């Protein structure tokens, strides 16, 4: 699987820790930035590139984007047709699993100010290992979303 990463300054440190973790899980990692810590950078500049890459290769690609809360990053990603970004910044893991099983999320947006490195690694692994259920009702709903 190809994993497209993107972040702004708020998630930079965590992104840098997730890269080797993802490579150890035998994923190809493509980093869309930020490439250095810059307190003045803007997450849309990086997240858009990752989201467009996921949308261009949906069979082989997933995305992980990071920011302070993950909310703005998900909003940017979800502007790209074919992207279904889910936000996680803590709480029950079942919510995260449902984002894959029912909604076929293809980008995970992490709130780096609310989760630590170990939680992020655990959540990323769960998200990547949870498949879309393929149930007809969920396919139908995704088709409706994609028609917008």
Image: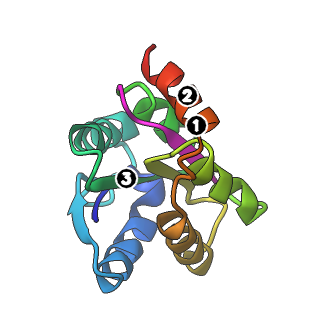
Residue 33 visible from this viewpoint: yes
Q: Residue at x 36, y 43 (%)?
A: 40
Which of the colour schemes (rainbow, by chain, secondary structure, one colour) is used? rainbow
List the single residue furthest toward the top: 148
List the single residue furthest toward the bottom: 24
Local secondary structure at mark 2: helix
Q: Residues within 10 Å of mark 3 (few under 14, many from 20)?
A: many
Q: Reading the chain from its start, which is encountered first: label 2 or label 3? A: 3
- Real-space Cα distance between discs 3 and 1? 24 Å
Residue tagged by mark 3? 63
Rendering coords of residue 1 (x, y %): 28, 65
Residue tagged by mark 2? 140
Q: Residue at x 40, y 73 (%)?
A: 18
Rendering coords of residue 30 (x, y %): 21, 60
Pick the residue in front: 60 or 54.
Answer: 60
Q: Which of the 4 quarters of the picture holds residue 13?
A: bottom left
Q: Is residue 126 left or right of residue 41?
A: right
- Real-space Cα distance between discs 2 and 1? 6 Å
Residue 5 visible from this viewpoint: no
Local secondary structure at mark 1: helix
Local secondary structure at mark 3: strand
Marks 2 and 1 in Cβ contact (< 8 Å): yes
Q: Is residue 38 magenta?
A: no
- Dot label at residue 136: 1
Which of the two marks, 3 or 1, is nearer to us in this view? 1
The vertical placement of 44 against 108, above or below, is: above
Quarter in which the C terminus is drawn? top left
Q: Residue at x 39, y 66 (%)?
A: 15
């Amino acid at each position: 699987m190809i994993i497209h990463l993107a972040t702004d300054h708020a998630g930079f440190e965590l992104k840098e820790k997730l890269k080797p973790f993802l490579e150890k899980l035998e994923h190809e990692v493509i980093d869309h930035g930020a490439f250095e810590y810059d307190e003045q950078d803007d997450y849309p500049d990086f997240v858009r590139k990752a989201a467009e890459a996921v949308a261009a290769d949906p069979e082989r690609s997933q995305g992980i984007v990071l920011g302070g809360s993950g909310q703005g990053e998900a909003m940017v990603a979800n502007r790209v047709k074919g992207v279904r970004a889910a936000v996680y910044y803590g709480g029950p893991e079942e919510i995260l699993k449902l984002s894959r099983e029912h909604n076929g999320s293809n980008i995970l947006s992490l709130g780096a100010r609310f989760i630590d490195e170990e939680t992020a690694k655990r959540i990323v692994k769960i998200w990547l290992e949870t498949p879309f259920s393929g149930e007809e009702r969920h396919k139908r709903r995704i088709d409706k979303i994609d028609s917008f």
